[in-house]
Image: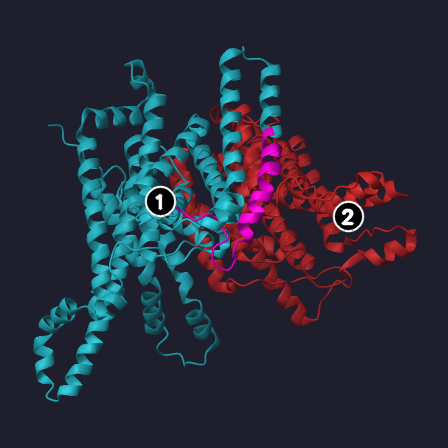
Amino acid sequence: MDFVNAIILLLNYIFIPALTYGSQLALGAIFVTLIYGILRFANFATGDMMSFGTMATIIFTWYFQSLGVSLGVLPTALLAIPFGIIFMILYMLLIDKFVFKYYRHQKSPPVQFAMVSIGVMFVTQAVVRIIIGPSDRRFFDGEKFIIKAREFKEMTGLNEGLALKSTQVITIFVTIVLVSLLFWFLNRTKTGKSMKAYSDNEDLALLSGIDPKRIVLVTWVIAGILATIGGALYGLDKSFKPFTYFNNMLPIFAAAIVGGIGNPFGAFLGGYVIAFSEILLTYAYKKFFMYILPENMEPNSLVQLLSTDYKFAVSFSILVIVLIYRPSGIFKGKVL
Amino acid sequence: MVGIFQSWNIALSIFNLCLISAVMTMGANIQWGYAGLINFGIMGYTALGGLAAVLISVDPVQEAWRAGGFDILMSLWLIVVMILVIRFILKRFEKSKIRTYSIAAIIISGILLIRFSAEPGIEAIEAVDPAKTGFLGGFGLPIIFSWIVGALFAGGLAFIVGKVALGLRADYLAIATLLISEIVIAIIKHEDWLTRGVKNVIGLKRPAPYEVDLQTTDWFIKLVENFNSGKLSIIENLADRKAALNQLVIEGSSVFVKLCYSGLFLVVVIILLILTQKALYSPWGRMMRAIRDNEEAANAMGKNVVKQHLLIFILGSAIVGIAGAMLVTQDGLFTPGSYRPMRYTFLIWVMVIVGGSGNNFGAILGGFVVWFLWIEAAPISLFLINFFTAGIPETNALKAHLIESVPYFRFLMMGLGLLFIMRYRPKGILPEKIEIK
């Protein structure tokens, strides 16, 4: 019985939160990797683009709520996400037309692109804060829990409860669907294959008649979808605050590089690597060992490898280690 | 200009921060403009400079040293031993899987050992009067020394970072340095025994006199009296004149203190400017440009590219470290929570790009212009909003919302400024110009 308790404990505090957080990171990381692989620059505006998409979603959510439209037990935001995506894509295409296109035609070095994306970051940040303000916002409605901790205890008679938030299930489910669709698109359709070809070798791709404008357009559309959904899921699960989104850019970068930049599948797994290591290393295992070990061996400290303050530092350290020992990432992306 | 519109006090504090920004920008400019190295870790070096200011100037907390000093020294010793062992292994053994794994094992077990040995000491130190001290304190030296120590700290960090990350391609160097600086901030924020963390350190010593002391000093009152004799002589009543003088002395004292800081900072800026200008036109400067413009060719000519990159990375970071120490000196307090990448990394980069990379005067100009706009963006945009919405009544929701979000227009201004400069004047306001003598 103690053993089952210990497993449930780990499931509740480590596995499910890490899976959720990892899914949110994974979507962002695929976004970074796609932009890197096809448009060839490190996009420092990642976090703020995600917050823009989330903002659009929130505004539509409010609109639907004021109309009285709702999805019952599901959050209204799910209904608003498609509209948020459209806004996001429009905003991205606008930025691409006025900002990035010029540098692409000039064939500027990636560093210049990165600098420009910092300019975009400033502007996006300003736009988001001017429209919706910098404060913390929750836009979740509908049923909050699928299984409540107390109900689970009563149901199974265990000491440890397993709480399952509906946002967690939605996040994981949406991520799986979206990512499988994306991989199907990249690997099976003609456009997806031509995107891959363009990413591998631009000149060869152009020679074989691939239209670069179309590739760029499709990339921004996919990026817009990923950014909005990733951002909105994070906002639903936690809360929306522009500053947090800006900060999330860093673990997202870490995930993309750890997985191998330019490799969408690597980025997907990289998100989970980062999330799991962050949570595994900063969790206090005291209770776990209390269940597992015989009574006289119970630990009296918290058995925490690192204090939770270092959550971010963990992912960055992993990144630094990967950069030193395997600069191409765990799953062989491009060599930096 | 601000002096006339707002007050001399505000004008001087903006000027002082402009000077500090100029120093930071010069540091970043050395790395980016001379050598083409991208460093997004400016925030980390600034914070280390600030840490140096705390460690140098604060009086040591005797009680804390007694409580946990021994444990801390032991852990430091353990770290040194660990590094020596790793160096020994790296030298003695051939590169192999076993070597890598054993090094990893040493690091992990070392970290665990240090955690266990330092834990009681840290707890003891943090328990010493946590509201006031709860940390080890510093050396109790004049704070000016910290400017040099800050440079050393930042240079030391840059050495480690450079060893690790300089081999990366440009935009990944940017990401790696950004993340490393976040790690530095996380450590400064949470190692309370060293820095008091988010509890902040306040009331640091000053290199300039205190306002309160000045207000009671005779020569200063005389100075203010002489300075304002014309204004004072208009007032007939003796008591009124005295009151007016008092007011002037209070105002004058804070201006005077700020002027002292400006003088000190100006000296630093001028010294750095002379040094960097000399370096730019020296054979070394030419070599750096050669490396920047064509690494392979410079390498083929027998220049040690890796070594020079590391050197310039350290130099630039050290200058940023000086600026960090200056900043804390000026504020008189150290607030680890206030180090944000937006303000201390990206804004500095906007200054470098806008001012003109590779040109020291451009860097200083960029520091001044951008900081001035950053501070004055809110008043300017408020004026603009009021101007354009003059016809709309005050109660209009849109106008109220816009006025409420005035502080965020500074981001918009910076972003647009950066984008326009990058597009239409990619070399900055004052582009790099190299005269061959």
User: In the rendered view, does B344 fall on the left or right side of B123?
Assistant: left
Q: Is residue B337 magenta?
A: no
Give the colour of chain A: red
Residue B325: image x %, image y %? 33, 47
For the point 46% across and 63% down, the residue is A130
- In this rendered view, identify the residue nearer to me: A254 or B185: B185
Q: Chain of mark 1?
A: B
Q: Is residue B130 magenta?
A: yes
To the question of a shared chain for discs 2 and 1, the answer is no
For the point 32% across and 70% down, the residue is B383
Residue B129: image x %, image y %? 52, 57
Callout 1: few (<14), some (14-19), or many (20+) C-alpha neighbours within 10 Å?
many
Q: Secondary structure at mark 2?
A: helix
| Span of residues in magenta | B110-139
Q: Chain of mark 2?
A: A
**Which image quadrant for residue B236?**
bottom left
Residue B300: image x %, image y %? 31, 14
Q: Are marks 2 and 1 in contact (CB under 8 Å)?
A: no
User: In the rendered view, does B107 fall on the left or right side of B232?
Assistant: right
Q: How many marks?
A: 2
Q: Which residue is mark 2?
A: A12
User: In the rendered view, does A34 fall on the left or right side of A13?
Assistant: left
For the point 17% across and 82% down, the residue is B242
Q: Is residue A207 visible?
A: yes
Q: Which residue is mark 1?
A: B349
Q: CA distance from mark 2 to mark 1?
A: 43 Å
